Image: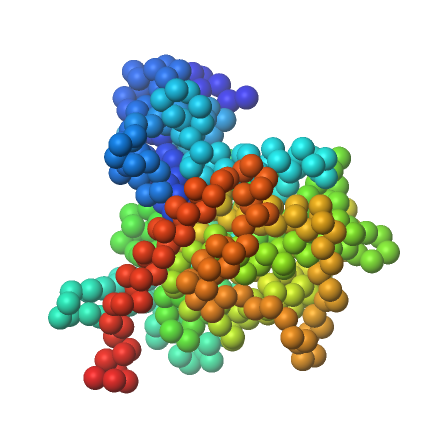
């Protein structure tokens, strides 16, 4: 248990900062002088829920955010010593707010444990991102353009695009990533490794280590916060946008995952590598993969990445080692006690609390109903006719509208959540769909 008062005393803290995620997965925060610490811990801080995406209406807008003391960490980016928390959202009567994404994941974990399938769900995220020197975007009615400036834009032209695991001096931001990972480690977020990714013009990856489902979602939010702000402090632009550059590799947020019982993965089997539980979990994700996409890939830009090429994981199949299937069984894992599966379609425009919850609920449905995922895909052989990830956001939202019982019938969320999510995202999709695109001018004007 974290001793908040000891941290305050040892670190000479002047402010506390409480962060929380809106429904879209954007961090919000409120900052208070250290003199308000006890009040904040006991009573929380009131705020206007109608001003937060996906929360309350103006008729009943008052909400409360309370810091979770187990998330207390010194904010290494604040100029004045600040103790940072992740907060939970409450109604004014003291009950948890049902649209709080963190609460939705907590309820999912409780539901999983009640099934007595496992003790914990473990996840490992792969954060992919681009770093640019500058970007100019104009959406003025008579002046629409995008101009990206990268320090690497001339480096890989003579390198045949082979930028994966590129070394210095081609890897210009090696020190940036190392420094960022050092800060994450200081915050208690364990890093597995970092490297230059496939995309030219400075694409990178930081892979975190396995942690529990809730901590993984918290870690993703904190890591994104630190990476973006560290870039800003160095006069750089860092983006997790799924497809910022045409005909270059996109940014994914792959999730390795397994269910753990008594410290061992229940997905492993001595004879056939994957256990029946593991196969059924995969079967659930494949069955609901098209509706899961509305939560794991909730932006219009998500589907510019999910096209053929660049190892795009568009086929709702599983395989050993093949990166074009939605689910990959890492071929390098030899110990069946730690076997995991990698779900590759998600990206970082998702709310990590909702993305992880949707994967778990689909997997649980597969286990409960013994859903068979079929035979694995074999690399190099023509795929049999299989379901595909939706082609666009509207298609994914329609799938969620039709296929959501595996989510709503668990009691984790209700139909009101589904309606609200569909409304927010359809409005967003329409705004993009009706906006003229610069490339349209090139081919039609």
Tell me: residue 364, above or below residue 133.
above
Tell me: residue 323, above or below residue 13.
below
Is residue 184 something that shows in the picture? no
Residue drawn 37% across and 70% down? Answer: 245
Image-based side of 79 in relation to 84, left or right: left
Number of marks in the rendered image: 0
Residue 237 locus on image (x, y percent): 31, 57
Image-based side of 274 in relation to 50, left or right: right
Q: Quadrant of the N terminus?
A: top right
Residue 273 locus on image (x, y percent): 79, 56
Is residue 391 something that shows in the picture? yes
Q: Quadrant of residue 40?
A: top left
Residue 168 locus on image (x, y percent): 45, 64
Image-based side of 151 in relation to 193, left or right: left
Tell me: residue 326, above or below residue 437.
above
Question: For this rendering, which residue is in front, 331 or 306?
Answer: 306
Q: Quadrant of the C terminus?
A: bottom left
Residue drawn 43% across and 72% down? Answer: 248
Residue drawn 64% across and 38% down? Answer: 112
Residue drawn 36% across and 22% down? Answer: 92
Question: For this rendering, which residue is in front, 428 or 179?
Answer: 428
């Amino acid at each position: 248990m974290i001793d908040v008062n000891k941290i305050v005393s040892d670190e000479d803290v002047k402010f506390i900062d409480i962060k929380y995620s809106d429904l879209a997965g954007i961090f919000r925060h409120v900052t208070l002088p250290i003199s308000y610490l006890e009040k904040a811990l006991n009573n929380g801080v009131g705020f206007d829920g109608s001003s937060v995406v996906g929360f309350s209406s103006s008729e009943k807008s008052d909400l409360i955010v309370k810091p979770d003391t187990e998330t207390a960490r010194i904010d290494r980016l604040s100029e004045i010593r600040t103790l940072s928390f992740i907060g939970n959202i409450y109604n004014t009567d003291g009950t948890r707010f049902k649209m709080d994404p963190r609460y939705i994941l907590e309820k999912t974990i409780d539901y999983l444990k009640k099934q007595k399938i496992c003790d914990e769900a473990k996840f490992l995220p792969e954060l992919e991102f681009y770093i640019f020197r500058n970007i100019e975007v104009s959406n003025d009615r008579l002046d629409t353009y995008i101009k990206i400036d990268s320090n690497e834009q001339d480096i890989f032209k003579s390198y045949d695009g082979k930028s994966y695991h590129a070394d210095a001096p081609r890897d210009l931001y090696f020190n940036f990533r190392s420094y960022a990972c050092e800060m994450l480690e200081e915050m208690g977020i364990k890093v597995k490794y970092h490297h230059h990714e496939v995309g030219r013009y400075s694409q990178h990856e930081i892979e975190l280590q396995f942690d529990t489902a809730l901590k993984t979602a918290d870690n993703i939010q904190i890591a994104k916060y630190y990476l973006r702000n560290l870039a800003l402090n160095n006069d750089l632009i860092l983006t997790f946008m799924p497809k910022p550059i045409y005909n270059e590799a996109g940014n994914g947020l792959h999730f390795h995952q397994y269910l753990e019982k008594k410290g061992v993965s229940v997905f492993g089997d001595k004879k056939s590598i994957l256990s029946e539980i593991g196969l059924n979990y995969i079967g659930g994700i494949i069955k609901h993969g098209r509706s899961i996409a509305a939560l794991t890939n909730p932006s219009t830009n998500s589907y510019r990445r999910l096209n053929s090429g660049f190892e795009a994981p568009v086929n709702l199949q599983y395989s050993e080692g093949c990166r074009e299937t939605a689910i990959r069984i890492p071929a390098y894992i030899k110990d069946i006690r730690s076997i995991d599966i990698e779900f590759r379609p998600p990206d970082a425009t998702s709310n990590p609390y909702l993305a992880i919850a949707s994967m778990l609920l689909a997997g649980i449905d597969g286990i409960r109903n013994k859903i068979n995922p079929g035979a694995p895909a074999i690399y190099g052989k023509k795929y049999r006719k299989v379901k595909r990830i939706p082609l666009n956001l509207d298609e994914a939202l329609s799938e969620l509208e039709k296929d959501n019982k595996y989510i709503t019938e668990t009691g984790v969320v209700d139909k009101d959540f589904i309606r609200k999510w569909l409304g927010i995202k359809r409005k967003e999709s329409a705004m993009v769909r009706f906006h003229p695109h610069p490339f349209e001018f090139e081919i039609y004007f």
